[in-house]
């Protein structure tokens, strides 16, 4: 790579990117993630080549999903817990986000925050805001691929942050090894806009802001959650979810959370769930990529594009049934393919 190319990043080959990433060069990693996030076809193609080269070096991290309602303290928690993991435990940590709402609000959950100030200065931490994607699927794709690049760059711990109010948790759960839900003291999860399904996905429920005059409130919330957890059936991972209290401000409870995560890791690696789950996630990832490719291939076909509107109109006017219209469109598509 010549010097000019290093500065501009232009005309980099897939090998240039891959070498930089495997060296742990954060600037190259950042640029590769930008490439992954790009919707331009030539960027997508190059991104896939980079990913292909990095794939054999990925997968060696522990992946943690962190969710919770807005204002619960996710960024503050990631700042505090991230610093603990990097400084006290000596890990290299990458923080990514899935936030499909960022296009609506104009900002992203990590991007407009200055609270991870200390963590962002750590040489062993890498923080990347959510891409401004157009759909949850698109954003989730980018995050998944960015995660693989971070792993190839040597990050051993990955946090994926998401706002715990929508569907993005399911997407996150599909790419992490461990799922954490942060909750506020003194309000039921329904009040916090957290769906029961999300509570059931969590491996740890952490009542944050357990400090000052909220300590007692947090303790009693923890007790309620611990009782509620007993009602859930045991997870296929063999892990019994735990309810804890913590404070991102005082640092209280963070070592205990780390200890639980270590216990979890030991259990799921021993009982085989860790590998099984990774394989199941890969299979699901493959299926969804396949579906997306087929979808794109079909709807970007010029014949389909030009006939779609007329078919839809015919359906709306009652001239043809939706099923027949769909079959006709599929026929047109198949006939348009080169023999
Ligand atoms: P997010 O929207 O979930 O990312 O929440 P933030 O990290 O932005 O925090 C929302 C507000 O809660 C901020 O004013 C934080 O200073 C405050 N906060 C976060 N964690 C704690 C905590 O552990 N204790 C207290 N007292 N305040 C906190």
Image: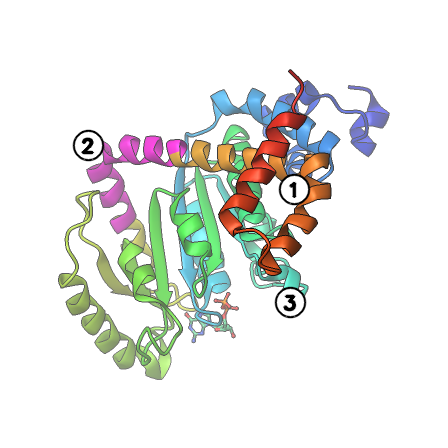
The verdict on label 1 being within 8 Å of ligand 1 is: no
Disc 1 to disc 2, C-alpha distance: 36 Å
Q: Nearer the viewer, residue 75 or 40?
A: 40
Indicate the secondary structure of the residue bearing disc 3: helix
| Picture coordinates of residue 143, whole percent (x, y) | 54, 44
Badge 3 is on which residue? 105
Q: Are marks 2 and 3 in contact (CB under 8 Å)?
A: no
Q: For the residues carrying marks 1 and 2, which lies nearer the camera in this image?
A: 1
Disc 3 to disc 1, C-alpha distance: 19 Å
In the displayed structure, 227 sits above or below 297; it is below
Indicate the secondary structure of the residue bearing disc 1: helix
Badge 2 is on which residue? 270
Q: Are marks 3 and 1 in contact (CB under 8 Å)?
A: no
Residue at point 55% right, 33% down? Answer: 294
Q: Nearer the viewer, residue 226 or 119?
A: 226
* Nearest to N terminus: mark 3 or mark 1: 1
Disc 2 to disc 3, C-alpha distance: 43 Å
* Nearest to N terminus: mark 1 or mark 2: 1
Q: Nearer the viewer, residue 323 or 339?
A: 323
Question: Quadrant location of residue 38?
Answer: top right
| Picture coordinates of residue 127, whole percent (x, y) | 57, 48
Which portion, as a residue range, is magenta?
260-283
Indicate the secondary structure of the residue bearing disc 2: helix
Residue 59: mark in rendering:
none
Residue at point 48% right, 20% down? Answer: 56
Mark 1, other Cα within 10 Å: few <14 / some 14–19 / many ≥20? many
Residue at point 62% right, 60% down? Answer: 317
Q: Is residue 322 visible?
A: yes
Badge 1 is on which residue? 37
| Picture coordinates of residue 261, whole percent (x, y) | 29, 47
């Amino acid at each position: 790579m010549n010097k000019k190319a290093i500065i501009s990043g232009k005309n980099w080959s897939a090998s240039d990117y891959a070498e930089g990433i495997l060296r742990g060069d954060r600037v190259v990693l950042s640029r590769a993630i930008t490439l992954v996030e790009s919707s331009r076809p030539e960027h997508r193609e190059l991104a896939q080549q980079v990913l292909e080269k990095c794939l054999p070096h990925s997968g060696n991290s522990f992946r943690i999903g962190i969710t919770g309602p807005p204002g619960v303290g996710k960024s503050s928690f990631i700042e505090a817990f991230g610093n603990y993991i990097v400084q006290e435990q000596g890990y290299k940590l990458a923080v990514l986000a899935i936030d499909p709402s960022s296009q609506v609000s104009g900002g992203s959950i990590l991007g407009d925050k200055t609270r991870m100030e200390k963590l962002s200065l750590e040489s062993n931490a890498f923080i990347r805001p959510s891409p401004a994607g157009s759909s949850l699927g698109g954003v989730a794709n980018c995050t998944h691929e960015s995660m693989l690049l971070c792993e190839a760059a040597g990050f051993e711990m990955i946090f994926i942050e998401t706002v715990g109010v929508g569907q993005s948790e399911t997407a996150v759960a599909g790419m992490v090894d461990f799922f954490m839900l942060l909750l506020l003291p003194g309000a039921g999860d329904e009040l916090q806009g957290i769906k029961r399904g999300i509570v059931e996905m969590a491996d740890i429920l952490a009542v944050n802001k357990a400090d000052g005059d909220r300590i007692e409130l947090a303790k009693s919330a923890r007790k309620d959650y611990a009782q509620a957890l007993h009602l859930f059936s045991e997870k296929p991972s063999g892990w019994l979810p735990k309810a804890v209290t913590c404070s991102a401000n005082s640092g209280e409870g963070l070592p205990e959370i780390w200890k639980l995560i270590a216990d979890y890791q030991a259990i799921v690696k021993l009982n085989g769930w860790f590998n099984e789950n990774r394989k199941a996630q890969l299979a699901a990832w493959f299926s969804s990529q396949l579906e997306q490719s087929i979808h794109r291939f079909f709807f970007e076909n010029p014949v389909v594009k030009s006939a779609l509107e007329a078919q839809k109109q015919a359906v709306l006017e009652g001239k043809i049934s939706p099923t027949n219209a769909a079959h006709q469109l599929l026929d047109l598509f198949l006939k348009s393919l080169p023999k």
